[in-house]
Amino acid sequence: MIALTFEAPDGTRVDAKAEPGETLLQVGQRAGQPLEGTCGGQMACATCHVLIDPGFLDRLPDPSAEEEDMLDLVPDATRCSRLACQIVMTERLADMVVRLP
């Protein structure tokens, strides 16, 4: 299991555990986080927008052109913005903090 933490805008933290190969969206939904994933991970919406701790960005593959296009539609996107449906959990992401915008 891979431990990680979700942080709400008010600073409330929820610890979660992921299986290798799961998407961050699946983990967040199981942990009761408000990540809709309306399109089912097809990158047709941005309802799973999250902010990744900057110390973990280099542990993730670069976003695809399609993901970047969707993030361009997010009004509060930052350089730490990613779509949770596109992040596949690996041991390299253990102890990651994921902020909800």
Image (cartoon, rainbow, N blue to C red):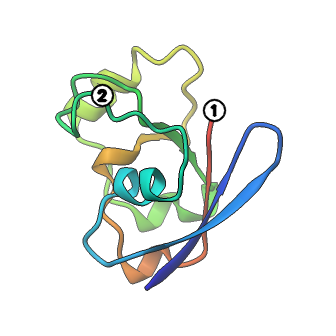
Q: Residues within 10 Å of mark 1 (few under 14, many from 20)?
A: some
Q: In the rendered view of the protein, which quadrant contains the C terminus?
A: top right
Say if 33 sits above or below 68 in the image: below
Q: Residues within 10 Å of mark 2 (few under 14, many from 20)?
A: few
The residue that mark 2 highlights is 38
Amino acid on which the number 2 mark rests in the picture: Thr
Q: Nearer the viewer, mark 1 or mark 2?
A: 2
Label 1 sits on a secondary structure element that is loop
Quadrant of the rendered image containing residue 43: top left
Amino acid on which the number 1 mark rests in the picture: Pro
Pick whichever, 22 or 87, lies toward us. Answer: 22
- The residue positioned 68% from the left and 60% from the top of the image is 14
Label 2 sits on a secondary structure element that is loop
Say if 66 sits above or below 55 in the image: above
Image coordinates of residue 81 in percent, x first then y, are 51, 38
Q: How far apart are marks 1 and 2 (CA)?
A: 17 Å
- The residue positioned 47% from the left and 53% from the top of the image is 28
Quadrant of the rendered image containing residue 75: top right
Label annotation for residue 101: 1
Image coordinates of residue 41 in percent, x first then y, are 22, 40
Image coordinates of residue 55 in percent, x first then y, are 62, 63
Quadrant of the rendered image containing residue 6: bottom right
- The residue positioned 47% from the left and 18% from the top of the image is 74
